[in-house]
Structures are given as structure tokens and as C-alpha cells.
Amino acid sequence: MLALTVANLKMMARNRHTTLWSLIFPLMLVVVFGLFSNFGGSNPSLAVIDQASTPQSQALVKQLSSISFLSSEPDQQIDDVQSEIESGTLDYLLVIPENFGAGGQTPPTLTYSSNNPERNQLVVGAISNVIVSSKIAESQADDGSLAALVSTEITVQNVSFFDIALLGLVSLGIMTSSIISVAVKISTYRGQSILKRMLVTPLAIWKYFAAEIAAHLLLALVQAAIILAVGVFIFGAQIHGNLAWIFIIVLLGSLVFLNLGFILSAWANTPSAASGMGNIIAMPMLFFAGAFFSTTSLPWILPYVAQALPLTPMLTALREVAIYDAPLWQVWPQLAALGGWIAGTAVVAIKVFRFS
Amino acid sequence: MERAIRVEGLTKRFGAFIAVNDVSFSVKSGEIFGILGPNGAGKTTTLEIVEGLQKPTQGQVNVLGMDIARDSARVKARIGVQLQSSAYYDYLNLREILALIGSFYPKRISPDLLLEQVGLQDKATHRVRQLSGGQQQRFTVAASLVNDPELVILDEPTTGLDPQARRNIWGLIREINQRNVTVVLTTHYMEEAESLCHRLAIMDRGKVVATDTPQNLISNLRSTYTVTIMSLDTLTEDQLLSLNGAVSSVQIQENNTYVIRLSDVPRALDSVLEGIVHNDIRLEHLKVTPVTLEDVFLELTGSELRD
């Protein structure tokens, strides 16, 4: 069995399709996502809540909107805005107090997250300058610009879209290589009677499958490690959680996808049919399970469908562990769901698998 | 003599279709045994049951003294099998494939020795797809020998090969047999069956219609010669059948060519030749050949064996 596992790994390494699907493709996406989130990002956003609504405050709002590198957000409720800063969808919140410009002593408050200290410095400076140069605050604060603006920094977990997307890309790599490459490989072997050739040897059938699965699980670990490493070391993604737990979740997810690959191989009569069927299953699942975009706003029953997909618990568990540093036992519902999928797909795979 | 294979009353049904119909035969240890028949005769199905790949609907199959239904793993460890048109892994070289298949057996021969036996020692690091058709076939024979088997089963080992490559495989099969390995092979080539096999089972439509040595099968035929004539005129079957009562069958081919099989009666050849002269049949060409397995097959099944 060890010989067969080693032979399988050797064949995977020599097969350019495996390398393409399992590594090059997800890595290309890592590069694309990495470039967009690091260099292609939009301007930091600023929301202003004008509680004073005086001519002075309105003049200030107008002047603030002229800061070219800030994009202003429409007025919102203060609770909302604060939670948006915490979740990273809003970058800066400026609250102009009620008595602003009317002889009161309270300066405006700027709230932002601790994520981006260099940018924070820049933005705080720019807004202070606007307030000072507008000379509105001068009459209130005798000690100059220092009191023109009060800064409040919210310490939040540094989670960027890229961190979340990177875990989606790990799942993409594992899912496509497991589902598609297993389905294609097994249907090729069946077409060429290689499976039958195995059956005329005394090799126990379970050993044949165990060797295939072992080789693919190892491939999944290598894939996950490489994709994460590129994301973290080249594009600065943050992984807060325990790596061993991340890999355990990766293995459980791979088992589900390998079983799906075995099932597809039984239905597909040719390798190209297997490849097509694999893509039809893998690609929509990737998006519906929320690998890159939130699925909660989907219409109709689609959010529930998303919840039922095997990729969803894998992604949720990966995010909880990798981003929020949750211990493995905290994601037990997701692990249980994956376990259920593993058992269910294994039963179906054993039932439908055919050697010839 | 010990029996390498004993098949008794073997039947295999796929739904309403009977692929193998109450077949019995046995293979002696140390012989080259051929199963001859057209495509769809049930040869491969019979072998796959012997190899433990398929379960019989009915009947007993005993291989090397073991019941294949009960001891299939032990049987598989001691036999070698070459499947019809089976490929091998694309991404492993010849040596690696043989080492991998060998790892499934308790007893194994080194890949290099096997490659040497089939004359592929200088191709050890090549992939299967880089080999010619004949080399690929020799490689599949080598792969069937990895476990130093007492019995090898070769399913159509020479199908699709050119005559030279075919003879090359025959030589290889004889060499294997000389090392006291029992060989069972299927073929639909008469020449192969006649020159290579010690004994033959002739299969047609799921049944074994005869089992004997090629020589006995031929001499048991109630016919001795075939006379092929090409006539200037078109002749009827009745005209030819009535040639002095010595004709057992007539086959009409293109271009006024007729194949006349003679009955096994004294002086049959003389009488037919006399009849041709007597009936004023104008000949362009005449050929007299002793009967072959082809004639045996025609006699036994009523149809011709074609490639």
C-alpha cells in the first residue's frame, strides 16, 4: 500500500494537469486578489455625522468633502457607523458635536480602527488641518490645533478582505484538485482497464482506495501550505489561528471532496465528462458557500442552500480558527457537519463506484 | 496429469443474454492451451471468471487446485494475467510500473530481470506510450509475469500486431512455457492457434464446440482437402455439389471463385478432379490444399471465422 501511495504521489508530481489545477490556478488567484487588495484598493472612506447642523458645521462638512483622497459616505446612525468601523467596511467616522461653533468647548471626534497606523496619521493630520484652517475652531480652543480634533482609536482584529479570500482560495485549490482530478483520473483508469488490472492482483480493494486517498490528502496539505505561505509571506495576509487545526479542517474537507470525486467518476463515462461535471459542482459551490462574497443577502432559498453545502462548514471553520483564533472544539458544529458529509458521500461512493 | 484449470458447467448470464453457456474444459499443467473463437464467442468472459474478475451464474471453476469462488485472493497471488487492451499508468516508467505491480504480490521478480526476459531492458526508463505496439504487448506479457506465476492467462496477446511482432510474441510465449509455466491464451487467429497451442477449445456463441489438439481436430474432420477453383463461367452450388458425390461443402466467393471441401471418402480428390473435367468446367486457376483449422471451424460452427 505504501508503494502504491508513493507511486500515486510520483504520478501526481509528473502530471501537469494536477499541478495546474491544484497549485498554479489557485496561486494565480492569490496573486490577483493580493494585488487588488494591496494596490488596487479604493480611497479610505469617511462618514461625517453633523449633530450641530449650524452654518459653521455645514461649512466644515463641505470643506472636508474636498479632501481628495477621502471618499465621503452618506449620513448614518452612529451605532451603525461604529460597527462598520469594527468590521472594516468604514474607515473613518467624524462626529461634529451639537455645540460646535456655538461657543461650546467640545471638539469634533474622529473614530477609526487601529489597523492602518500610517494612514491614520495622515488622515488625522489632514482633517485637523481642515478644521484649523477653517478657523472655526480657533475661537474655541486657545491652545491651537491640538484641541481642534479628538481622536478615538478602536482596536480591532486586523481582518482584511484578502485574509478571508485567502481561505477561500485554499478551499478552491483543495476542492478542484480533489473533485476534478480524482474524477478525471479514475474515469481514465477505468477507460484504460487499469482498475481492472489492479483487480487481477491480490491487492485488497480497500488498500487501493486507501493509497489513492492518502496521496490526495498529502497533496491537499502541501497545497494548503503553499497557498497560505504565498498569501502570508508575499501579500501580507494574517493568520492568527493554530496551523495544525487549520490543516485538520483542510483534511476533513478534502475527504468530502475526494468522495465526491469518486462518485462523479462512476457517473462520467469519459475523462472529459468527469472534468465538466467536476467543474459544474465545484465552481458554483465555491461562490454559494461564500468563499469570496457574503451569501446572506442572496434571494429566496439560496442562503439555506448555501448553508447545506459541504464547503460552507469547511470555510466557516477555517475562518473561525484562522482569523479569530478559535480553538478547534469551538467549531464542533462545522466539524460535525463535515463528518456527516464524509460519511454520507462515502456510503454513496461505495454504492455507485464501478471498476469497469 | 495435474490440472491447472478445471471448468465444469460454467454459465454466465447478463440479464437475458447468455454469454457463456454450460462450458466445460480443463487445462493440463505445463501446456499451452488456446481458446479459439470469433469476437463475442464468450472467450473473454470465460477467462474473466477464471481470473476471479467476474462471478459465474452457475458452474465450478477450479484453478491450481483451488476453488476460485472461495480462494480468489490465493489464486490471484499464483497466476499471471494479461487483460485484453489494458493500458498502464501514463506517468510511471516501465521499471516503476513493474515494481508497483510486483509490490501487490507476496512473491515477485525484479523489474529489470522481467524487462530482460521480454527484450525491453533498454526501455526501462521509458513510458508505455513511447513503445511500439509490439513492444507494448511484450511489456504487458512481462507485467503478467511479475509474481513468477505457475499459470499465465493471456487474452488476445497478438491482436492488432503486424505478422513479425506476432511471431515475436509467439517466441516469447514458447519461452515462458519452456520454463514450465502453463499458458492459457485466447485468439481468433487460426494460424496462431495451430502453430502455438498444444491443445485448443473452440468456442462459438457461448459454447465450447470441440476440445483437442490442433492435429486431432484437423484429422477428425471428415474432410481431407480443399479444392479452390477459379472458373471462366459462373457455376451454381448444385452443379459443384453433384461432382461425383465427393464434395462435402461449397463456398462461393467473388470472381467465379469456388472453395470446394472434399468428403472423407476414398479417392475423393481423384473423383472431384475427374468430375471437373467430365463436366467441362473451364478453369482459369486450381489450387488443392490440405484442410486447416479454418475448415474445422466451419465444419463445427457452420460459419467462417473472421478477424
Image (cartoon, coloured by chain):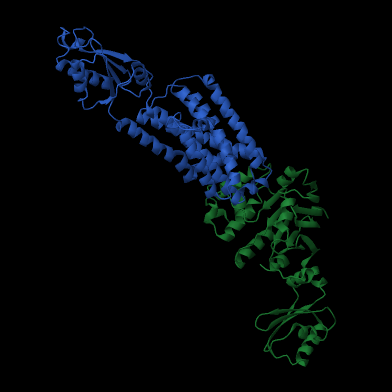
Chain colours: A blue, B green
- A166 is higher (above) or lower (below) than B239: above
- A63 is higher (above) or lower (below) than B256: above
Residue A59: % across, % down: 18, 19
- A157 is higher (above) or lower (below) than A270: above
Q: Between residue B240 and residue A230, name the one nearer to us.
A: B240
Residue A227: % across, % down: 43, 33
Task: Name the residue at 82% across, 79% down.
Answer: B263
Q: Residue at the far right: name it.
A: B266
Q: In this view, does A213 lie to the left or right of B10?
A: left
Task: Name the residue at 71% across, 46% down.
Answer: B76
- A192 is higher (above) or lower (below) than A67: below
Inspect this view and state whether residue A218 appears: yes
Q: Is residue A240 left or right of residue B162?
A: left
Q: In this view, does A262 lie to the left or right of A79?
A: right
Task: Name the residue at 35% across, 23% down.
Answer: A88
Q: Is residue A271 left or right of residue B34?
A: left
Q: Quadrant of the N terminus of chain A?
A: top right
Residue B250: % across, % down: 75, 79
Q: Between residue B66 and residue A64, name the one nearer to us.
A: A64
Residue A162: % across, % down: 38, 29
Inspect this view and state whether residue A1 appears: no
Q: Between residue A301 and residue A291, name the one nearer to us.
A: A301
Q: How many labels does the image show?
A: 0
Q: Between residue A248 and residue A320, name the one nearer to us.
A: A320
